[in-house]
Image: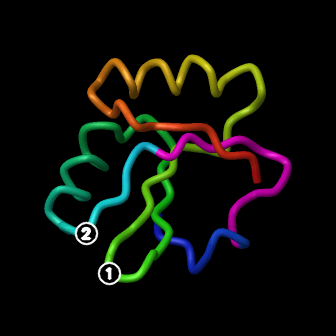
Amino acid sequence: HVVSSESALASNCYYVQIATMGNIKNIENLLVKYSKYPISLIPAGKNYRVLVGPLSVDEYGAVLAKFKDAGFKDAFVRKR
């Protein structure tokens, strides 16, 4: 889902940022492919930051590894 800004995300949680994307078709494809994950889109200029979460401290490591293995080599963890 699209949120207005980072401040709209749940606090004291972890998120894995997997990409910054501008192509809506690519974003839609990603949302379908990974529909079992809670994905948030944050507007960033003409693009969207793609975050998976909120995640607990016990979850984010496995989720980060999953997306890195899936080709999102620059994915990283953010704490909100």
Rendered location of residue 49, percent (x, y): 44, 61
Secondary structure category for the residue under label 2: loop
Residue 54, numbered label: none
Above or below, 60 against 21 in this view is above
What colour scheme has been applied to the protein in the rendered image? rainbow
Please tell me whether residue 10 belongs to the stretch shown in magenta.
Answer: yes
Q: Decide if residue 31 is on the left or right side of residue 56.
A: left
Q: Decide if residue 25 is on the left or right side of residue 4.
A: left
Q: Residue furthest right?
A: 12
For the residue marked with disc 2, what is the amino acid? Answer: Gly
The residue under the point 39% across, 25% down is 68
Above or below, 71 against 53 in this view is above
Range shown magenta: 8-17
Q: Dot 1, crowdedness within 10 Å: few (<14), some or many (≥20)?
A: few
The residue under the point 47% across, 70% down is 2
The residue under the point 48% across, 18% down is 65
Mark 1 and mark 2: span between their CA atoms? Answer: 6 Å
Q: Residue furthest left?
A: 25
Disc 1 designates what residue? 46
Disc 2 designates what residue? 22
Contact between marks 1 and 2 (CB within 8 A): the answer is yes
For the residue marked with disc 1, what is the amino acid? Answer: Lys
